[in-house]
Image: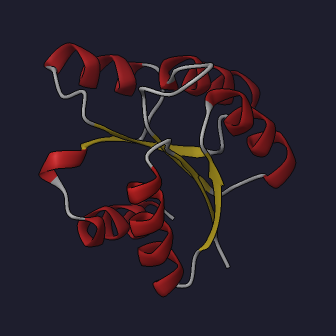
Amino acid sequence: MKKILLVEDDPFLIDIYTTKLREENFEVVVADDGDKALEFVEKEKPDLVLLDIVLPNKDGWEILKEIKAKNKKIKVIILSNLGQKEEVEKGLNLGAEKYLIKSNFTPSEVVEEIKKLI
């Protein structure tokens, strides 16, 4: 079973994405702030990190940099409301496999994007 680390601080979105991913037989671990996210990456060794950018403690940019510095094999999909061209380019340049803008993708479509990667 593939393990997904969902890094999100909105309880409503955590519930939706956790439910959708589990329906598709993914194991889901949730971190609701940046510090927990990095701790869980070390401890849980996820196959993929679904990463929000705006988070308490450490933002998604810092988390992405640290993940890629330590373990380039872990795939990262940014799932954010930040949708400016510069932000998308920054995420991809820092090593994210994909940058999905929350308002442009349904949870089911996000799961499909994850399946393409792992």
Using the rendered view, name the quadrant where residue 97 is placed: top left
Residue visible at 86% across and 47% down in the picture = 43
| Residue found at the very far front of the displayed protein | 11
Where residue 80 appears, x then y in whole percent?
A: 32, 37
| Vertical side of 27 occupied by 80: above or below | above
Residue visible at 18% across and 28% down in the picture = 83
Residue visible at 42% across and 65% down in the picture = 17
Left or right of residue 33: residue 88: left
Where residue 114 appears, x then y in whole percent?
A: 41, 62
Residue visible at 50% across and 68% down in the picture = 18
Where residue 102 appears, x then y in whole percent?
A: 24, 46
* Viewer-nearest residue: 24 or 13: 13
| Vertical side of 101 occupied by 87: above or below | above
Left or right of residue 70: residue 6: left
Left or right of residue 100: residue 28: right
Where residue 55 appears, x then y in whole percent?
A: 50, 28
Callout count: 0
Which image quadrant: the N terminus? bottom right
Q: How is the image coloured?
A: secondary structure
Using the rendered view, name the quadrant where residue 105 is placed: bottom left
